[in-house]
Image (cartoon, rainbow, N blue to C red):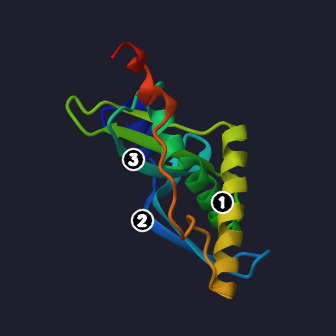
Amino acid sequence: VRSHPRVAEILAEKHAIELSAFWVDEETGAQCKARADLIGRAKDWPVIVDLKSTVDASPRGFPREALRYGYHIQAAWYLDGFNAVAPLERRFLFIAVEKEPPYCSAVYEFDIGSQERGRTLARRALRDWVEGEKSGIWPGYPAGLNELNLPAWAFRGDENA
């Protein structure tokens, strides 16, 4: 990982590892927390950095994984949380490292639209959690018996059987 020029640049700067932020959300009154892998600088920018192991760190593969696992939600949550504790215009970076040799790595930052979508989803999740805590009713799947239907593509080619 350290052989990646951008990662080496980030690690060369003064930084803190596994720093936590605790705050009270102004809207809901909920006690919140975040724990960053690294807080530091990247050139002239203060950054929060999260290290992610992945099967595919490529510009084509990692965005799919980021969406699947909600990394845009995490980025928005951490930025908002650390700003609640210590206001500062930070950037959130991901260091993606492949799990298999040659362990290729890349550094990513969400665009503004993706960060805003993450922020919307983080706020929604927080409101749902607060409502669940108050009511004892949590969102989930239907409690009854559900009909299970295979997707349409599973039947392709059956007409020739």
The first of marks 3 and 1 along the sequence is 3
Percent x, y of residue 93: 53, 44
Task: Identify the residue at horizontal 45%, vertical 54% (top origin).
Answer: 14
Amino acid residing under circle 3: Lys
Please rate how many residues cluster around mark 3, counting C-alpha atoms within 10 Å: few if below 14, some from 14 to 19, many from 20: some
Relative to residue 4, is residue 78 depicted above or below? below
Provide the secondary structure element on which disc 2 rests: strand
The first of marks 2 and 1 along the sequence is 2
Is 14 left or right of 92, judged from the image as shown? left
Q: State the image quarter where residue 3 is shown.
A: top left
Residue 109 locus on image (x, y percent): 57, 39
Q: Which mark is residue 122?
A: 1
Please report whichever mark, 2 or 3, sits nearer to the chain's N-terminal start. Answer: 2
Q: Is residue 135 left or right of residue 104?
A: right
Please name the amino acid that badge 1 sits on. Answer: Ala
Front-most of 39 and 67?
67
Question: Which image quadrant for residue 6?
Answer: top left
Q: Position of residue 86 (x, y in %)?
A: 67, 68
Q: Nearer the viewer, residue 11 or 148?
A: 148
Quarter that holds the N terminus: top left
- Taking the view exactly as shown, the residue that stands out farthest to the left is 101
Q: What's the mark number on residue 33?
A: none
Q: Residues within 10 Å of mark 1 (few under 14, many from 20)?
A: many
Which residue is label 2 attached to? 18
Residue placed under numbered mark 3 in the picture = 52
